[in-house]
Amino acid sequence: MCPQFKNWSYDLASTSAESSQQLDKATLSQERDVCCPVPPEIVEIKLYASARVNLLYRRRSSFEELTRKGELVNLQLLKDVLHTKITKHERRALELCVLMLSVCQKRSSVSGDTCDLAIEVCGYTSTKEMRYDLLCEDVLSLLVLSSVWVTEAASATNLARVAYDVLFNIATTCNNKYLSQYMEHLLDDKKRMYGEDLYWRLRLVHNAFISKKLYQDNVTQLLTLCLEIANCQSGTIYVTELLSDILVALWTYKQVDPNELPPRYRCLFMAKLLLAGFVHQDMVTTLVTTATHGEYSERKVALSALYKASKMNILPYGVNENIFLEMGDTDLGMLSVHASMLNERDSVLSYLEQLYIEVARRLCTDCNNVQDGFNMAKDGIIDLISGDGNLKGDTKIHLHLAVEKYFSFRDITQAISVAYRRLHELGRRASIDSATSCIATRSAFTEKSILLLLYLATLRVELIPYVIGVIDQSVQSEGIRDEVVRFCLSSILAANSNSIFLQQFVILACKVFNVTIKQYIMKYGHSTILLRQEMDCLMLDILRAMNWILNRCKSSIKSCRSIPHVGSTLASVAVYVNTVYWGRLTMDISHELSMALVRMLQACILKEREENIENPRYLLDEGVEYVPEIIGYCSSAFEIICHAIVPSVKLVRSILTVTWHSKHAIKVFNGLQAIASRASLGKRVIRELLLYCIHAKVHTDWDKATLLSFQKFVKLFVLLIQSNECCSKRAIKVDFLKVSAKNGWKAASRLRSRRHGTVRLGGSNNRVVFLRELSNKLKEDACSSSIAICGPLDLLDEHLRMNGIQAVSRETLAAVPWVGVSRLTSLMEEVLRRGPHDSKTWSYLFKRFELILNSFSHKHLSRVMVTIGKYGRCPSDLVPMIRTHALSQLNECDILSCCGILYGMDKLQQCDNELKASFKEQVVKTLDTATEPYPVVLLASLYSSSGDKKTTEALLRHLVNHVNELNPKALSMIVVSVVTQFGDNQGILELLMPFLLKATERTRDMDIRSLSQIYSSIAKSTLTNAQHILDELSDVIHQKAEFFTLHQCILILSGAARRRHLNSQLIMELMKSIDNKRHNATQQQLLFILSSALRLGMRDSSLVSKISQELHISDLGHTELANLTYMAAKWKLTNITNEALFEEFQKQSAHMSLRDMALVAYGFARIGNLPQMKQILAASEDLLNKQPGPTDPRIVGMMTQLANRVKFEHCDLQ
């Protein structure tokens, strides 16, 4: 055995052998000969470690107490071994042993949980890094023994996590007797499996079992252990998932009756068993029943498993064929499962028809066949997009049903898409008899059913992606008929207003047009001349419809949601022109296409400077949401169309302004290469291209491919100018153009004349020389750098000073005593924006404002109140004067003025219910004057916070028509304020549903503050679809969890606990984020985290253990103390002692409320210390007798429980 060592050093071992302080004592070799014996010290250390670990197996008390009495091995001797001749892999393994054991020993000498490893160390324990398979048996055994020691001595720490990772990797790659002994001991002594490291120990056993490191004799032990843990309700969601995996792995050796498992394990176990290939009829039937009638969480698990199993073709066909007849509106996900199981083409077509009839019946109960649904869809679409805004009665009902039954329609639409995909999988080439029998069925509903779905998606914008998926799948199996395309065209051209319903219908129509064009291109080679002419006419009609849409949108092109889809259609038409170009009709198509592209580009480009006509500066309007997508489609269409025709001068001039981005530029240059290689090119087009080359500048985000593409175009353009007779001086008229170092590109400096510093490009030779130099320079830059470098940015102004916002000058402020209403209003806005931000300046402004207050109109007063509200302070004597003057102007206020005044007063905390009631009638009366929705959003937030139901309903009814114009911040403001105040009011929640659906659609654009507030408010509401909405929010929140503040993390975690929303990915990321930020948490925040984690079933997690250790009971208030007592008793927290709670209770009992006393009474009744219970009961009785009026029955019940426990009889408490 190793002798006890002296002069213990607490220095941590390095992860690199070269960094050791005693490196000069021995000559290290990176590699040792394979036959070289293992140093005898390693064998000695291993034997000593083995004996120490065996002590753990025989002890029943605390393991940490044992480790404090002595270390596992002599660390100094182990460090000396690192200086002997061993391989680099063995050296790395021993260094890891030293690191883990050193930290473990340090932990035993310090108080609390302050010594730990960084979690990043786990990355160095992988099989690729450590190469466990190359370690000798003694080193591997020592590493296993060290890891086992650490897991027992430092549970629920990062150090233990590193040790478990080492054991996981060894269990999957190597055989080791000490690891087998440890796992067998875990199975024998089941008490060790419980506690804070339950998940990691189960995972270790699972890894060993699937790697066949455990014997079949251990199956019964493992199965018994899993069943015991499953029946214990303290397991976390991660334990639940892992236990289900272990039970599935055990199924081959010993089958488990699912009915023996608790409900929360049963469905998950059967789902995993099914996906593992163990198909049983009763199991499938149970999953089907759960998927249709189970709890929400169980339905999700069952549906996911059944759908995956159906795609793997392991489900029996014909399971519950009439399943959709048994469903209500809760969850129709089983429809997709059934569609994927159909095995015959006729049955798929029949099922499709039934699904379409179901859609029509849910919209209108009178619809009994596809024809009725088709007629309803036609009338509804025409009413939505062609009317004057006054919808018919039936259409209003359909609109309401589309909102109310959104999730049902979504599931049915997904089932239709799956059915079409199944139809395609079965193949188009069936037998002749089967195909003949299908033709009638197909023609009966295919062409009409698509219109029914188009109508549905026009009613509810959130259904558009699902309907587009149906269109894509139907094209593969059936195709879109011309009647549908013609109806879409006629409906668009008949529209009278640019309503939101028109925009939604245009998105769907563009998808129909795109797939139709794709069909025509594919069958063009086999079509007759007559059919080609019909195709060309249809393309021309589509382009005219697109131009009509662009004319209808006018200045709002950049903000219209449908315009990117119009751009996609234009790109598809360009592909058609390039493929089938011939004849006069195609020239008309090209002309219409060019007009549409120019119109889209001009709407997205802002001309910044007009004084230099030959070199204007263009900027993209990047603040608009859809501009980059529109530009992308336009550049793609330009590239394609250039291979067929020479585009117009307007199109060339417009498209050259979008070469600022590499992705767009390379498409434009590829198109220019195509037209530059033509024999003849228009004079005006040549002039535009020449001007672009003269003033070209390389952009900072151009890559090598873009530079080479530009260089290739310039090279071809040189050849064109040399060979083209139209490039004479008189024809091009560019004699006045001069290239200099200021307005030209870098290559221009080489061409400067000695006399004038410029080069005239009137002559053809000069143009050719310039373009050749430009081509050479581009090629040189492309070869020398992967990223192009532009000139210096404008960081300094013309006087070499920093560009920035300067405060309002003192000369301007000196004129404040003489300024009027308008000037003072502007001046206050400028001071708020630019400064100076000192109280003296604002006092100066407030004095002038008070003096001329009676001269302010409602518009100027509104602007000033917004400014004061943002500043946040106002003299107390001035506020009543503002209030009085605002009420005197009330009858003249429009909606914007009402909003500004109320907003400012609310920010000053002076907007009481009386003031809101005074403005209420004027707000409702002037709603129609609102030009933008955001002021109405602010008013809705204000009035909902005061509980004004009628005004809130009126504001929501107005905003619902503008829901697509709201940004994510406005949507979150409405949802949070309304749900917080009216979370139990179903009438207002129905009005709020469009905003909720739009908010879930825009979650990826929301900031983290809005996400946390929406999640928290919805979790506290009584919304019927809250689980669906929380799922959508969770998908985004877990990706941004690390950026949330501690307060926001607590909000989300508290909401998840309140709603029992057990999303494992969300909770895991939140716990990580909280763990990294908890060191700055207050005691109250730690209590919130602890309460939420316990309610989510994470009692045994490491975070709960750390928080319970970090709580300082003496720093808690009386309410926090009562809550902690309740939690410590209910969930049996081991790190919080009863003595400490009772001692603090005695200090604060005089300040406790009746509720606090009831919580303490309940807690100590569960704890069961009789002397303590008597004192608490006496204090509770005294406080209860002093309480006037009736008492909450729940409080009396808690105290009665304590009285019964002490076996007292108190009449007052019964």
Image: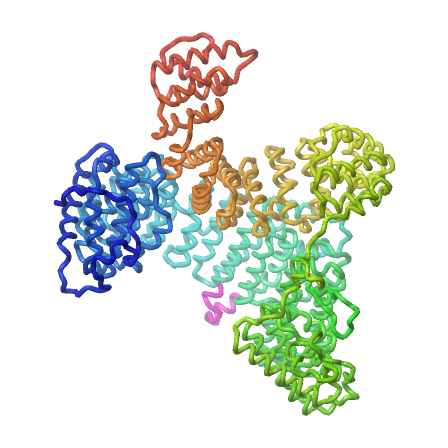
Q: Would you identify the image quadrant in which residue 1144 lies?
A: top left
Of the pair 580 and 72, the residue shown nearer to us:
72
**Residue displayed at 46% across by 16% down:** 1149
Of the pair 815 and 220, the residue shown nearer to us:
815
Q: Would you identify the image quadrant in which residue 944 lies?
A: top right
**Residue displayed at 50% across by 9% down:** 1185
Q: Quadrant of the N terminus?
A: top left
Above or below, 693 relative to 272: below
**Residue displayed at 62% across by 75% down:** 575
Q: Would you identify the image quadrant in which residue 492 lies?
A: bottom right
Of the pair 18 and 1137, the residue shown nearer to us:
18
Q: Is residue 249 left or right of residue 1049?
A: left
Tell me if residue 514 can be seen.
yes
Q: How many numbered discs, if any?
A: 0
Colour basis: rainbow
Q: Is residue 669 magenta?
A: no
Q: Quadrant of the C terminus?
A: top left
Of the pair 70 and 1180, the residue shown nearer to us:
70
Tell me if residue 221 can be seen.
no
Above or below, 1115 relative to 328: above
Q: Is residue 427 magenta?
A: yes
Tell me where residue 503 appears, x and y as whole percent: 69, 57
Which secondary structure dominates the residues rendered in magenta? helix
Tell me where residue 360 appears, x and y as whole percent: 61, 51
Tell me where residue 1200 appears, x and y as whole percent: 43, 15
Tell me where residue 215 appears, x and y as whole percent: 18, 49
Instruction: Give the magenta-colored segment's residue range.
Output: 423-439
